[in-house]
Image (cartoon, rainbow, N blue to C red):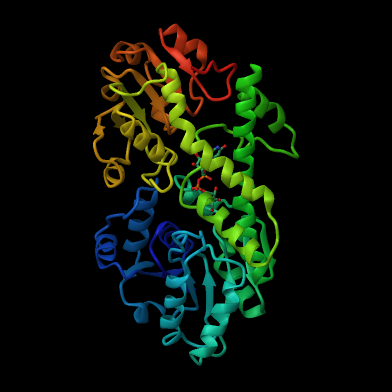
Amino acid sequence: MRIAMIGTGYVGLVSGACFADFGHQVCCIDKDGSKIDGLNAGVMPIWEPGLEALVKSNAERGRLTFTTSLPDGVKDADAVFIAVGTPARRGDGHADLTFVFEAVRELAKFIKPGTVVVTKSTVPVGTGDRIEEILGEEGVTGVSVASNPEFLREGAAIADFKHPDRIVVGAEDEQAQDALKEIYRPLFLNRAPILFTGRRTAELTKYAANAFLAVKISFINEIADLCEAVDADVQDVARGIGLDNRIGPKFLHAGPGYGGSCFPKDTLALLQTADKFGVGQRIVRTTVEVNDERKAGMVERVANALGGELKGKRVAVLGLAFKPNTDDMRDAPSIPIVNALIERGAEVSAFDPVAHEQAAKIFSGIEFAADAYAAAANADALVIVTEWDEFRALDLDKVAGSLRGKVLVDLRNVYDRAEAEQAGLTYYGVGRGRLERN
Ligand code: UDX
């Protein structure tokens, strides 16, 4: 199949590279000339494990090309995927569809009859209908519109694409269904479940999936608070409930609250849809509130561990990206923590294995250290904010030796209290026994 992919962000680039790897002929299109020049020279705009090698090998085989010219990219395509950004609009959380509709108006001039236009971007229910209308307004006929939401986790996006739990295709006609069946045939042959639904159902499925995962996280975070009050251990509670197949063990890690490019944005967009149709959605609304409060309040845990006062303290922060294996800082829990530390008069030395460049655009007045131990040097407390693997195997004796104050605030429950105490550290986890508050 000849595929055009409009937008070379996370979703577009990973999907484009993986489709090429399946053997399709893929042209990735982006307005950002420097991004396209970089990709043509083998330079990735994002940090994602395995992506560079996948892009290079498919580009070398001539199956993956990059261009800024939308006409060139879409004119012969059997399927045009739209994977442009749908950022939350400032103020109301609405998904901003400007880029999606711009792309549709433009591609309408160049696509051939029989093409299938597919939204990969996360778009509110009814967007596919609107796209169909726009194509009609532009005089396009014989073109189908489908929805094919992505469920990729940053840091594991290629594996998620190639071994999906399911593929969801929302299509209103056979032309769209057949095209997507053909595009996903390699996964189909691997017995990946492929679910054909109506277009609006597929659009909603994406929001419902992310909202449900966000609910799970906020749920376990509130249970963690309860654990701290009643002297119970949230890790054991999570295991105890997660072994029940009906609940499942995933997304039950208590921590500083969820961040990233999807959950915060998609939960708000779901609420916007609910408001528009006058439907409650109290569970998701509360989940958002719980998460916002949690992230804003995390700095109190550091203050508490340091006796209540942050002024004049030096705090080492490990992990800045919103999760491991990415340099993505969008809605990262580190942002309110670091900003509040600085506002309250603390010095911050931070280390993240890959996110310094992105973080430098957000924070001013923090020091970036060369590694975890350098960050810890002379600090009053070490705070683990993101659970990168390399923070799981720190030499705690060495950490304790570098620190001025012997305090470990482990917001991801990477360490056991006993091993931290053995190294002479005072340990503060999340939801792990009674938390004495100052
Ligand atoms: C998510 C979805 O998982 C993916 O299917 C969707 O398409 C895009 O959004 P992503 O945002 O990359 O992926 O990361 P994910 O691993 O889901 O984590 C999101 C946030 O939740 C992170 O901040 C993470 O730290 C947090 N989280 C996750 C928890 O706090 N606890 C958990 O148990 C799991």
Could you tell me if residue 94 is visible in this image? yes
The correct choice, above or below, for 351 with respect to 34 in the image is above
In the picture, measured across the screen, residue 372 lies left or right of residue 112, that is: left
Q: From the top left corner, tell me how far across and down residue 204 is, in percent.
A: 64, 62
In the picture, measured across the screen, residue 13 lies left or right of residue 280, that is: left
The correct choice, above or below, for 289 with respect to 113 in the image is above
- Count of numbered badges drawn on the protein: 0
In the picture, measured across the screen, residue 309 lies left or right of residue 174, that is: left
The correct choice, above or below, for 267 with respect to 319 in the image is below
- Residue at image x 34%, y 52%? 46
The correct choice, above or below, for 389 with respect to 287 in the image is above
- Residue at image x 40%, y 39%? 336
Could you tell me if residue 351 is visible in this image? no
Q: From the top left corner, tell me how far across and down residue 282 is, in percent.
A: 68, 50
Q: From the top left corner, tell me how far across and down residue 210 is, in percent.
A: 59, 51
Q: 147 or 204, which is in the foreground?
A: 204
Residue 310, located in which quarter of the rendered image?
Answer: top left
- Residue at image x 52%, y 65%? 120
Q: From the top left corner, tell me how far across and down residue 271 is, in percent.
A: 61, 57
Residue 44, located in which quarter of the rendered image?
Answer: bottom left
